[in-house]
């Protein structure tokens, strides 16, 4: 095989090739010939780099001849995750969102059957939204709560309904709520149409981490006075863009929606 970079590579190129090898085995383990082919290296060079990465625990042998991600990468991943301050990472983006929309902006995570508010940025409108940092509300009746549930299978949603369905307004049946969740899942966003408080209107979107898991949600919250159906629709791409911006800083590389 003809290498992309013949001869003994400089240290910077060696480092980059090491990263390329790690990226190559990210999805599933490969043999050294497969790694060499994927990265564009000769077998001896690929063998040398794989040996070093294995020695340093960035790779590990799997099933004899295959190599996959090693325990050192898992350790680093957990360390990076522990050092991540979600509120700090999201704050600048959410401040811009509150200024842009003039509405209240929330950042929240799931805690069991409830939403836990991590941050709240008041808008510039003369309205008061009954939420607070550290406060909790039901998942089923809030925009951020529904956004946090977008990946849950139907049986989990039905279990939540069995427990907390009595919190929904009398005009919203369980089947209505499930149908709306199907629509939200397809669109990658969620609404609060007054299920929690009759005058509230909210548009929310999930925030995904590097693994693609929904780890938080962000929302734009206003009232019927300022947010009719047309404005609700116009805010969907705005909140999805904000959520995608936060997710990108957490390492998520998937589609925005």
Image (cartoon, grey):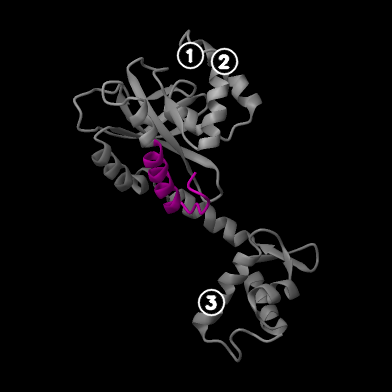
**Dot 3 and dot 2 residues touching (CB under 8 Å):** no
Q: Is residue 6 magenta?
A: no
Q: Tell me the distance, in whole angstroms, between the alpha carbons under discs 3 and 2.
A: 55 Å
Q: Report the residue at 72% width, 82% height from top.
A: 43
Residue lying at 56% horizontally and 87% vertically, measured from the top left: 9
Residue 57 visible from this viewpoint: no
Q: CA distance from mark 1 to mark 2?
A: 8 Å
Q: Which residue is mark 2?
A: 174
Magenta segment's dominant SS is helix
| Residue 6 appearing in the image | yes
Q: Quadrant of the N terminus?
A: bottom right
Callout 3: helix, strand or loop? helix
Determine whether label 1 and label 2 are within 8 Å by CB: yes
Q: Quadrant of residue 87?
A: top left
Q: Which mark is residue 35?
A: none
Mark 1 / mark 3, whichever is N-terminal: 3
- Circle 1 packing at 10 Å, graded few (<14), some (14-19), many (20+), is some
Report the residue at 65% width, 61% height from top. Answer: 69
- Up-down relation of residue 213 to residue 34 (above or below): above
Please name whichever residue, 233 or 193, is drawn nearer the observer in this view of the structure: 233
Q: Position of residue 179 (x, y in %)?
A: 57, 23
| Residue in the picture at 32% in, 17% down | 199
Q: Which residue is mark 3?
A: 15
Relative height, residue 183 to residue 177 (above, below): below
Which marked residue is nearer to the observer: mark 1 or mark 3?
1
Q: State the residue lying farthest toward the bottom.
A: 7
- Nearest the camera: 93 or 200? 200
Q: Quadrant of residue 161?
A: top right
Residue identified by numbered label 1: 168
- For the record, the magenta segment spans 236-257
């Amino acid at each position: 095989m003809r290498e992309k970079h013949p001869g003994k590579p400089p240290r910077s190129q060696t480092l980059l090739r090491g990263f390329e090898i790690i990226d190559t085995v990210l999805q599933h383990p490969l043999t050294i010939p497969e790694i060499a082919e994927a990265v564009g290296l000769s077998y001896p060079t690929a063998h040398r780099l794989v040996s070093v990465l294995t020695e340093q625990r960035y790779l590990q042998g799997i099933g004899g001849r295959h190599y996959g991600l090693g325990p050192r990468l898992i350790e680093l991943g957990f360390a990076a995750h522990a050092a991540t301050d979600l509120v700090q990472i999201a704050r600048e983006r959410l401040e811009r969102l509150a200024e842009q929309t003039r509405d209240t902006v929330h950042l929240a995570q799931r805690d069991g059957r409830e939403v836990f508010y991590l941050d709240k940025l008041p808008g510039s409108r003369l309205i008061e939204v009954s939420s607070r940092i550290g406060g909790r509300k039901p998942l089923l009746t809030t925009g951020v709560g529904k956004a946090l549930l977008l990946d849950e299978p139907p049986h989990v949603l039905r279990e939540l309904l069995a427990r907390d369905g009595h919190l929904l307004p009398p005009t919203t049946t369980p089947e209505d709520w499930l149908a709306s969740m199907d629509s939200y899942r397809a669109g990658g966003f969620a609404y609060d149409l007054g299920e929690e408080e009759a005058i509230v209107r909210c548009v929310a979107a999930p925030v995904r981490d590097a693994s693609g898991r929904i780890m938080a949600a962000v929302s734009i919250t206003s009232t019927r006075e300022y947010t009719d159906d047309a404005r609700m629709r116009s805010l969907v791409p705005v909140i999805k863009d904000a959520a995608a911006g936060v997710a990108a800083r957490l390492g998520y590389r998937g589609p925005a929606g």
